[in-house]
Image (cartoon, grey):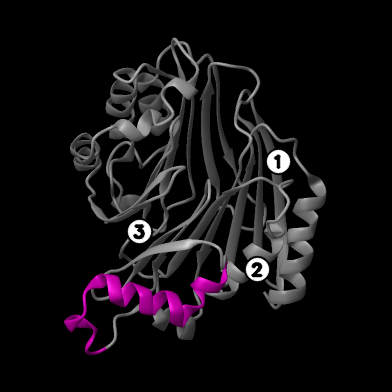
Amino acid sequence: MAVSGFEGFEKRLELRFFDDDKPITNNPMGLRLIDFESLDQVLNEVQCTVVSAVANRCFDAYVLSESSLFVYPTKIIIKTCGTTQLLKSIRPLIHLARNLGLTLRACRYSRGSFIFPKAQPFPYTSFKDEVIVVEESLPKSLCYRKASVMTPSNNPSRAWHVFTASADVESDESVVVVEVCMTELDRVNARSFFKRKGDEKNNSDSAGKEMTRLSGIDNINANAFICDFAFDPCGYSMNGVDGDRYSTIHVTPEDGFSYASFECGLSLYDDGHEDISEVLSRAIDVFRPSDVSIATTYGGEDYNHEVTKRVERLLAKKLGLKCRSRIMDEFPGSGTVIYQSFTPRRK
C-alpha cells in the first residue's frame, strides 16, 4: 500500500423523514422540492460539488466531485470520499426538511476502514468522535440508538462502522441496501478508468461513457439509465437510475491504493428483477479485486440467510472468492446488517 494517496473509502449518511401533518401523497415531491442552491450550500460545507445529475419520476441522482447524492421524497442518501466533512450536512438537511413540513424519522451513518486514516480531519480519525458528532446533531426524538464496529476475524483492519438512530423501534424502510467495497483492483481492469491520450480534448461526460462501456459497467444492470463522469487524469463515478432503484459506483484506480465501491438499493421479493447474487457477481467482476467486503442492510424486510449463502456460493463459483468472515448485528428501528469479507481462494 502507498504511504499516502486519495482516500477511496466513503462515508455514508442516510436520513429518512415523515410528514408532520398530512400524508406524503399531499406533497408527493417531498424533499425533492429543496432548491438546488440550498443543496449546493450544504455540499459546500461538506467540501464537494455536483458534477452531473439525472432525475426520473421517483428520485434525483447527483454525481458529486466526491461520490454521490440521492434525494427521494422522504429520504436522502449522501456518500462522500476523500477527506470530506460529511457530518456537517446533518443539521442543514434536517432544517431544510423541516421547512417542508418533514420531520426526521431515522438516521444511519456508516463507513469502512480508511486506507489513510491519519489523513482524515476531526472527527473522522475516531469512530467514537464521529458518533458523538452525529448524536449531537440529531433531535432527542430519535431515541433508539446504537453504534457498532463489525470487525472481521480474517482482517481486523477492514472493519465496518455503523451508527443508527430511529424514532421507532420497528423499521419503516422496506429497501435492502447492499454496499460493496473493493481494494487491490486488477491492474489491467483498472486501466479502463484512466483517461487515454486524446481524451483531454473530450469532456468528462463522453470520457465517462467510454469508461462505462470499456469496463463492462453498462452490463451490470441493463435496465438502468447511467449518469457517469470521468475525472482527470483518472477516476470514475456513476449513478444508475432504474425506476425507484438507485445504484452507484466509484473508482480510484491508482496502483497502491486502488479502490472501487458498488452500492444498490433493492427489494429481494420483487418480481421481474434479477437475483442480487448475479448483480453482485457482475459488479465485482468488473474490477477483479483481491479484497472484497459486502455490507447488506435489511431494513423492514427480515434477514434472509439463504440470500447470504447464495451470494457466497456464486462469488466462489464464478469469481473464485471465498467468504472468510460473516458477521451479523441488529439495530433497533434500523434492521439487520450482515458484513461479509472475501478474498481469492489462493490467499
Measure the C-alpha gap from mark 1 to mark 3: 27 Å
Confirm or deny contact between disc 2 and disc 1 (CB under 8 A): no
- Of all residues, the one furthest to the right in this rendering is 306
The amino acid marked with disc number 2 is: Ser
Judge whether residue 301 can be spotted in this image: yes
Report which residue position mark 1 lands on: 328
- Say which of 59 and 268 sits in front: 59
Q: Is residue 76 left or right of residue 169?
A: left
Q: Residue at x 39, y 77 (%)?
A: 211
Q: Is residue 205 left or right of residue 161?
A: left
The amino acid marked with disc number 3 is: Glu
Mark closest to the chain's N terminus, 2 or 1: 2
Report which residue position mark 3 lands on: 7
Q: Secondary structure at mark 3?
A: loop
Report which residue position mark 2 lands on: 281
Q: Which residues are magenta?
A: 197-220
Residue 84: x percent and y percent? Answer: 28, 47
Mark closest to the chain's N terminus, 3 or 2: 3
Q: Quadrant of residue 125?
A: top left
Residue 253: x percent and y percent? Answer: 39, 73
Residue 127: x percent and y percent? Answer: 44, 37
